[in-house]
Image: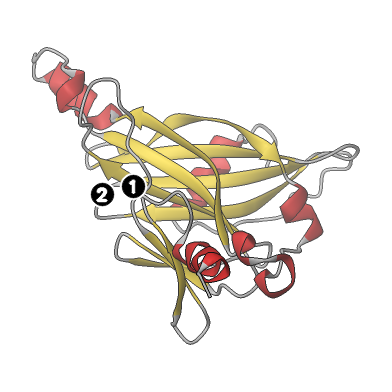
Amino acid sequence: MWPGQSTEDLGLLVITGGKLHRWPVPGAHRYVVEAFDVDEDAGVAVALIVTLPRRGAGTSRQETYEYEPSRGWIALGGGAFSPADRALARTRPSAARSGPAVMISTNGASSTRSYVERLRRSEAGRPLSLGTVSWVSTGVIEVSVEVDHLLFSGRRISVPDHGRCVVTWKSPAPTTTTRPTLPRIAAADRDGRILTELGPDNTLDTFTQAFLDELTAPG
């Protein structure tokens, strides 16, 4: 990071495939790209940027973006996500040792109305109707060591060593008040075998549910 650069700037550099450089400023905070996801077809992107101060715990900030052809990527704002213990420790649980529940889990989600669609309606002189404006959504997914990659919205998302991923998607809002749910996401091993799936209607992922069903089956 160069002096004056923000996590928003760094996230934009990451999602556009820019080259990251070290800036050796004594005493400065360090920044690490924890995870990112780009859906070019939907025109949405997200990045998790970890801030590592000289002292104290690191924090992870989520930056979300939406693409508009004449303007490029537009930042939709960000927010603090959580302490970055996973990124610092570079460890993740094993489902074989800790149980099926750690295979895949959600750890935070957010949604906002499409800025691009609101902008276009405003420029066209059309009244803003939230019921016709799509959602731009993100979700943080954590997986066990058994998982090599995620399959989500037609994309293959590699899992970083620390096991925390972030995904983004765009969906129409069914009402003006209801936020969208996470679409179905599958966790696969290195050979491409599906280990478990988590869908919008699932309380538990399929691997955990099958384990509990077997455990409680009569006989």
Name the residue at the front extreme: 219
Q: How many marks?
A: 2
User: Eyeballing the image, is 143 above or below 9?
Assistant: below
- In the visual, does 127 lie left or right of 60? left
Left or right, 215 with respect to 17, comes to right
CA distance separating discs 1 and 2: 7 Å
Sequence-earlier tag: 1 or 2? 2
Mark 1 crowdedness (10 Å alpha carbons): few <14, some 14-19, many ≥20: many
Left or right: where 21 falls relative to 52: left
Q: What element carries label 1?
A: strand
Provide residue 117's location: percent of width, then percent of height. 20, 29
Q: Residue 42 carries which label?
A: 2
Is the N terminus in the top left, top right, bottom left or bottom right quadrant? Answer: top right
Q: In which quarter of the image is residue 179?
A: top left
Residue occupying image coordinates x 29% and y 34%: 135
* Residue at x-position 82% and y-position 43%: 25
The residue that disc 1 covers is 169
Callout 1 touching callout 2 (CB < 8 Å): yes
Q: Is 96 in front, or is 86?
A: 96
- The secondary structure type at the circle numbered 2 is loop
- Give the quarter of the image for residue 192: bottom left
Residue under the image location 37 percent in, 29 percent down: 112
In the image shown, does 163 or 119 lie closer to the viewer? 163
Say whether residue 62 is visible.
yes
Q: Where is residue 24 in the image (x, y as percent from the top left)?
A: 81, 49
